[in-house]
């Protein structure tokens, strides 16, 4: 299936604008039960200087698990994210700043225990080398808030041959209706 970047952008824009002009982050599987989602209007994704937020700001915004992954480059345990089994049409967003990262059409079951994608939305992610586990890997982050998402590997399916292996706690999901 070939994805049209123009239609992805239009679809993404419609999701970001929302029906009433106010989006509430739908943090499925990414926030603790006692932490309600924050309205995006509190931290507008288009105007907030995400890189200027303090550690205290991030701790207040994220669950402890999401903070550990997004801000400290931790990894969640495999097979713990409900998003691993998510199969509806929609868009996966950064749990830190709400930037759209992956279309659900790019998701596949890698068997690794983490949500995996064969590609990402254009301009959404940035990569850097990671040599922490006695091997060279490629780590990737949200381009806007620099939140750690996961690692990319060259063992994925066609058409890219890539596996963008993501921490579920670093994502939110919005179903396309």
Image (cartoon, rainbow, N blue to C red):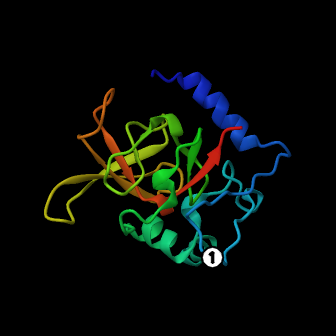
Residue sitting at x 51%, y 59%: 82
Q: Position of residue 126 (x, y in %)?
A: 40, 46
Q: Nearer the viewer, residue 151 or 28?
A: 28
Horizontal side, residue 151 vs residue 29: left or right: left
Furthest-left residue in this view: 134
Q: Where is residue 34 in the image (x, y as percent from the top left)?
A: 67, 78
Residue sitting at x 81%, y 51%: 22
- Point out the image quarter for the C terminus: top right
Q: Position of residue 66 (x, y in %)?
A: 51, 69
Q: Is residue 124 above or below residue 61?
A: above
Q: Position of residue 36 (x, y in %)?
A: 71, 71
Residue sitting at x 31%, y 28%: 158
Q: Nearer the viewer, residue 94 or 123?
A: 94
Quadrant of the rendered structure where residue 91 is?
top right
Horizontal side, residue 19 vs residue 164: left or right: right
User: Within 10 angstroms of label 1, few (less than 14), some, or many (20 or more) residues?
Assistant: few
Residue that mark 1 sits on: 60
Q: Nearer the viewer, residue 92 or 137?
A: 92
- How many discs appear? 1
- Looking at the rendered structure, the secondary structure element under dot 1 is helix
Q: In this view, does 10 lie above or below 25?
A: above
């Amino acid at each position: 299936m070939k994805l049209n970047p123009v239609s992805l952008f239009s679809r993404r824009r419609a999701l970001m604008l929302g029906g009433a002009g106010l989006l509430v982050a739908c943090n499925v599987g990414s926030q603790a039960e006692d932490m309600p989602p924050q309205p995006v209007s509190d931290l507008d994704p288009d105007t907030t200087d995400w890189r200027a937020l303090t550690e205290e700001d991030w701790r207040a915004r994220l669950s402890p698990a999401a903070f550990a992954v997004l801000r400290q480059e931790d990894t969640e345990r495999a097979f713990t994210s409900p998003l691993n089994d998510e199969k509806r049409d929609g868009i996966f967003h950064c749990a830190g700043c709400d930037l759209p990262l992956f279309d659900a059409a790019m998701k596949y079951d890698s068997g690794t225990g983490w949500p995996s994608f064969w590609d990402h939305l254009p301009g959404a992610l940035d990569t850097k080398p990671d040599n922490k586990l006695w091997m060279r890997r490629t780590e990737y982050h949200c381009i806007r808030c620099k939140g750690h998402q996961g690692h990319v590997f060259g063992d994925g399916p066609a058409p890219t041959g890539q596996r963008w292996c993501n921490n579920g706690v670093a994502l939110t999901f919005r179903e396309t209706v």
